[in-house]
């Protein structure tokens, strides 16, 4: 798409980069970001680690970094496996319920607390908004603290910073 737009001489603008005079986004759908992301995360869990969704397994732990609008919708979506229809079907099937935990910078910034939290996490969600998206919120080695079956879902909605390069799509 980027190549075709460039070929046509079109200038694409990311809708989430449109801001009012105070810097607040004017176009956003944080509900869809949260729900679509968690639906994708649970689809990945089902495809890659179905054993973790078997009847009799312990409660699924979803850890959400960020308590803004995206994080709030992600928490609601998490306890419903990312979809109300899936919640009904999986509940009937006996899939373990979900406990969603929202964490902030104090836990993320404390290696001991972060390690303890990540060790029990089945789905890690980044729903943060940061001014410096190039700086990692969680160091790479911390991802090794997750269980082998864990799914990482990146929902971060960092501000658009023009770089001359096309924006990238982030997914789990």
Image (cartoon, rainbow, N blue to C red):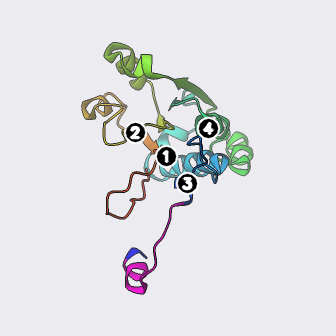
Question: Which residue is more in the foreground, 136 or 82?
Answer: 136
10 Å crowding of disc 2: few (<14), some (14-19), many (20+): some
Q: Earlier in the sequence, mark 1 or mark 3?
A: 3
Image x and y of residue 80, in percent: 68, 40
From the image, tell me which residue sits under label 1.
Answer: 45
Q: Which stretch is magenta? A: 3-14
Residues marked 4 and 1 touching at CB (< 8 Å): no
**Mark-to-mark CA distance, 3 and 2:** 32 Å
Residue under label 3: 16
Task: Tell me the SS state at disc 3.
Answer: helix
Magenta region includes residue 11: yes
Name the residue at 38% across, 24% down. Answer: 119
Query: For residue 22, which quarter of the picture?
Result: top right
Residue identified by numbered label 2: 149
Tell whether 75 sits left or right of 160. right
> Tags 1 and 2 in contact by the CB under 8 Å rule?
yes
Instruction: Look at 61% across and 48% down and name the residue there.
Output: 20
Asked whether the beta carbons under mark 1 and mark 3 sit within 8 Å of each other, the answer is no
């Amino acid at each position: 798409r980027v190549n075709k737009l460039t070929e046509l001489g079109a200038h694409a603008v990311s809708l989430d980069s449109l801001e009012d005079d105070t810097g607040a986004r004017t176009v956003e759908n944080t509900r869809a970001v949260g729900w679509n992301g968690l639906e994708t995360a649970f689809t990945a869990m089902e495809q890659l680690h179905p054993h973790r969704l078997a009847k009799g397994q312990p409660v699924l732990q979803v850890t959400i970094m960020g308590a803004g609008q995206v994080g709030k919708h992600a928490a609601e979506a998490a306890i419903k496996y990312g979809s109300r229809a899936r919640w009904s079907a999986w509940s009937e099937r006996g899939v373990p319920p979900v406990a969603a935990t929202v964490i902030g910078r104090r836990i993320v910034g404390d290696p001991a607390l972060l390690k303890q939290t990540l060790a029990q996490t089945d789905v890690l969600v980044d729903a943060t908004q940061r001014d410096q998206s190039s700086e990692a919120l969680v160091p790479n080695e911390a991802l090794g603290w997750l269980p082998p079956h864990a799914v990482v879902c990146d929902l971060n909605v960092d501000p658009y910073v023009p770089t001359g390069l096309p924006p990238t799509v982030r997914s789990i």
